[in-house]
Amino acid sequence: MSFFTDVSTEMIYPLLPVFLAGVLGANASFIGAIEGVAETTASLLKLVSGWLSDKIGSRKILVVIGYGIATIVRPFTAAAHSARQVLAIRLTDRIGKGIRTSPRDALLADSAPVQARGRAFGFHAAADNAGAVLGPLLAFMILKLHGVGSFDGTNRLLPHDEQALRNVFWLAAVPGLIALAILIVVVRDVPRREAGEKAAEASGGAVGGGLTRRFWAYLVVVLLFTLGNSTDAFLLLRANQLGVPVAMAPILWALLNLVKSATGTYGGQLSDTLGRKPLIVGGWLLYAAVYFAFGWAAAAWQAWALFAVYGIFYGMTEGTEKALVADIVPRSRRGSAFGWYNLAIGLGALPASLIFGAIWDRAGAPSAFTFGATLALIAALLMAFVAPSRARSEAK
C-alpha cells in the first residue's frame, strides 16, 4: 500500500516546483510557503489522529480516511490554473497524510510480532523508498514520451510541456487508487487484546498521557537530532556546488532512495537481533560523518559517494527509530506515542532548515554542515543513555 502511494506522490512532487514556477508563475517564496503550511498542518494532525486511534478502537478507519483524501485530491493538481489552487490541493493532501500516518504506524506495530518489529518497520520504509525511486522514473519516462525538455528562454515551459506535466499528474491517480484498493480489501485492524495477550507496559513507569519517562527522554533526543537534520534539498544544492549538473539531480536523488530501499529491511532486522541502540547510535554517527564530509568535499564524485553512504544512514535508522517507539510505550498508547514522535520530527524540521540556511548564508557551507554533524554527534551520545540495550519482550 505504501509503495504504490509513494509511486503516486513522487510522480508529482519532484515536478511541482517546475509546474508552479514555469506554468503558474509562482515565486520561490510562495512555493516555500506552500510546503511550510502543508507540512506543519500534517504534523499537528499526526498527533490528533494518533490519540484518536487509541480512543476509538479502530486504526484502519483513520488510515482509510487519510489515504482516501490524499488519493482523491492529489491528481487534481493537473486541473489547477493558479498557485492558490495548488496550495489548497497540497494542503488537503497533507491533511490526509496527517490523519493516516500515526494510526498507520501504530497499526503496523500492532500487526508485527515483537521479535520482528524492527524488520517490519524497516520493510515498510524500504517499500516507501522503492516507490520514491519508481515514481520519478515513471514521470521521467512519460515526459520523455511527450518530448519534454526544452524551454523558451524565459524559464517558462512550452505549451506542449505544460500539457505533458498535467498528464503526469492525472496518471498519478492510478497507483494511488491501487494503494487505496489494497488498503480497503487486504489490510485489517488487529484486536487490541488478543486471547492470552496482556497489555504491554514499558519499563520506566507511565507519566504524562500514560506514556513513559523513557519515551519522553527519547523524544527530546530525537528532537535534538532533528534540529541538525535539515532538508535534503541542501545536499542537492551542495552537490551542484561540487560539480554535479542540474540535469543529473533526479538521478542522484534516485540513487539515494535506491540505497535507502535496499538497506531498510536489513537495518530493521539487525535492530531485532542486535538491539535498537546500536543501529540508531551507529546511524546517527554515520550521519555526522557524512555531513562533515559534505562540508569539506571538493569534487563531484565525492558527492555521489556521500549520497550513497547517506542512504545507509536511513536504512539503519528509519525503521529502527519507529520500532523503538513501539518498544517503550504501552500498546494501548501507541497511537498517541507515534503522534508525538511524528509531531516532534515535523515541527523540528522547519527551524532545522532555517538555522542551517542562515549559517550557510553567513559562514558558508562547511560551517553549516559542521553544525548539523555536531548536533548529530551530541544526539548519538545522549541516545546511548536513553535507549534500552535490547528490545523489550512483551508479555504473552
Image: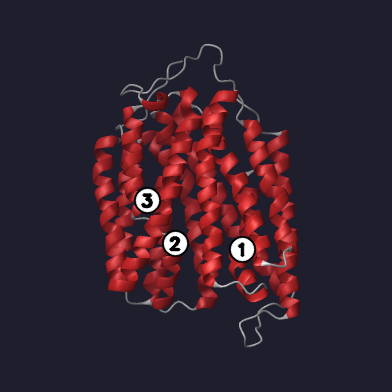
Location of residue 358 (image quadrant):
bottom left
The residue closer to the viewer here, 227 or 259, is: 227
Task: Tell me the CA gap for discs 2 and 3.
Answer: 12 Å
Q: Nearer the viewer, residue 89 or 153?
A: 89
Q: Which of these two is toward me, 127 or 229?
A: 229
Residue at image location 30% in from the left, 45% down from the top: 281
N-term-proximal mark, 2 vs 3: 3
Residue in view at x 48 percent, y 54 percent = 260
* Mark sitting earlier along the chain (1/2): 1
- Disc with the residue nearer the chain's start (3 vs 1): 1
What amino acid is found at the position of numbered circle 1 in the picture?
Pro
Binning the other alpha carbons within 10 Å of mark 1 as few (below 14), some (14 to 19) or many (20 upward) gives: many
Give percent across and percent down for residue 379.
Answer: 28, 47
- The residue beneath circle 2 is 232
Q: Is residue 159 above or below residue 139?
A: below
Left or right, residue 118 beside residue 299: right
Q: Which residue is mark 1?
A: 136
